[in-house]
Image: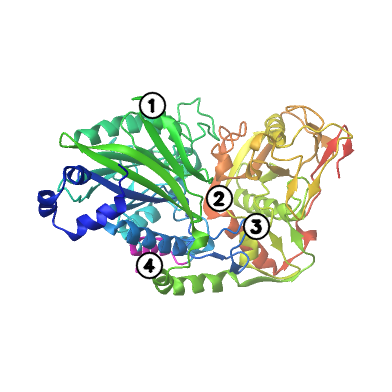
Amino acid sequence: MTVNRRTLLGASAAAGAAAAVAAASPAEAKQQHRYSFTVMGTTDLHGNIFNWDYFKDAAYSDAAGNTRGLARVATLVKQVREERGAKNTILIDAGDTIQGTPLAYYYARVDPIVADAGPVHPMAQAMNAMHYDAAALGNHEFNYGLDTLAKFDSQCEFPLLGANVVDTATGEPAFPPYHIQRLRTPCGKDVKVAVLGLCTPGVTIWDKAYVEGVLEFPSLESTAAHWVPKLKAQGVDVVIVSAHSGTSGKSAYDTSTGLGIENASALVAQQVPGIDAILVGHAHIEVPESRVAGPDGREVVLSEPLCYGQRLTLFDFDLVLERGKWKVESVAASVLNSNTAAEDEEIGAILSDEHNEVVTYVNQVVAEEAVVLLTTAEARYKDEPIIDLIAKVQVDTVTTALAGTEYADLPVIAQASPFSRTAELPAENVKIKDLSSLYIYDNTLVAKLMTGAQIRAYLEYSAEYFVQTPAGAEVIVDAAAKTDNITGAGGRPDYNYDYVSGLAYEIDIAQPVGSRIANLRYQGAALADDQRFVLAVNNYRANGGGNFPHVAAATEVWSESIEIRTRIIEWVTAKNRLDPADFASVDWVLTREGTPVF
């Protein structure tokens, strides 16, 4: 017999449970020992509340027709609650909430929530209004330091979960490891649902300055293996993991030191018995449904909704009561597209003032005089002045900081990456939003001691980004579509390809990996292996992000907590102009057997 579970729920809600059992046929009585509920999930919201691109000062749009933001997701959540019954739903998130847009940055740094009588974070306001039940911590929750995270935690009317975010001093979780929710059923026996929160161990590297000696991040697999049996011992019927960790089983850092795997959600499903579903985060990809065989022979259902509030995951659970215990009979996952929903009026009313305040902020002019339009459209394969601007600011900042120290006489060189393929700095009236689009991450600046030999190895590793292309082979470049056939080898993202300014070199993409850097020179002379440099580098790279050689182990001679983006804004504001003559340099060129590609 096929059971319409939604109709059953409506009938059960309308009639008293005892009366229904007394009057029911045997088949109907059996149906009343079933229960269905839905878990809704978001992840990697990254400060997106409205469908607004603060860098372009316009509504967000892309070629696929996607929209962004919690305001639209809120409408979907209300629709699901109305259809399923609000008491038969749970709403959770898998992390990376308070970083990623100018809106998020503004309330961390410009009008910070940690200030005396500071504001309530817009993400807390929106998520509270939507009645989230729990959220896992993501790595970007730690970007602004533990005080900001603690304040955000205090402003949320739901728990932030981190079973593997461990207090170094006590060995105990620094945040609640799990959340248990009771769902009332028509037959009178509650369903106990546990949500276990896990965070990628990469925080240990990426936000080392904040967490070293304070917090530890054991592996997801070992942590889940510890907590799931404890949840089962408490009589939990359903175990859901909210994991800020992708499914690939890979890491962007060296795990040989014992640090857990960055993207371990599928490994958790494979290794830890007793888990029913995993809401996946961190990877910024859409996985409507994936099924992984667990060690007990049961399938674990995984789903990752697309980031920035573009999708909402639904886990639909069907349970049956057997011998007085609820058993998960089936789980199915799917995603809803936020572009099918209008923005929720309640969220708009709550946060319109904050949104307008940030729009005003990012539209402040910081350079009235500019010379030419600068763009990142070709910056991944050509040495473009727009990336030289980042490097120049970093060199100037580190040089000033080291004045009067024992390192003052060492040459300062700088690393920078082409983060965006769409950033532009206009030919006049450059605004904060323009500079922010150039440096989209909240990285800070670090100075590391490096030798010539180490810099060469660093550049060879970076040059792995290019596809090996023989001389004479066609190179296809479509700047308008932002595509080409020579970059992103092996799926390496643009942010893991680095320029190094202050040197001159060729990248010969006809050569195999490890033999591509040619004519590497400093001030016109061949680079000596024992030459010492200070490398100005972002904290992500300095701490091992991207697994570039030598830099993480190199001696640190200086660092600061001010974002590189802020330093760029300060530098341009002080000059009140943007002239490539002040920062541009020709440091490198792509070649094939000595002949420039472009």
Residue found 33% across the figure and 62% down from its top: 82
Q: Residues within 10 Å of mark 2 (few under 14, many from 20)?
A: many
Q: Which mark is residue 443?
A: 2
Q: Name the foreground residue: 11 vs 310.
A: 11
Q: Label 2 is placed on what type of residue?
A: Asn
Classify mark 2: helix, strand or loop.
loop
Q: Nearer the viewer, mark 1 or mark 2?
A: 1
Residue found 58% across the figure and 41% down from its top: 541
Up-down relation of residue 399 to residue 128 (above or below): above
Residue found 55% across the figure and 45% down from its top: 539
Q: Earlier in the sequence, mark 2 or mark 3?
A: 3
Asked whether 126 falls inside the magenta stretch, the response is yes
Classify mark 1: helix, strand or loop.
helix
Q: Which residues are magenta?
A: 111-129
Cβ atoms under marks 2 and 3 closer than 8 Å: no
| Residue that badge 4 annotates | 118
Q: Is residue 448 visible?
A: yes
| Residue that badge 1 annotates | 271
Q: Is residue 316 left or right of residue 489?
A: left
Q: Earlier in the sequence, mark 1 or mark 4?
A: 4
| Residue that badge 3 annotates | 63
How far is the residue under mark 1 from the one under mark 2? 35 Å
Classify mark 4: helix, strand or loop.
loop
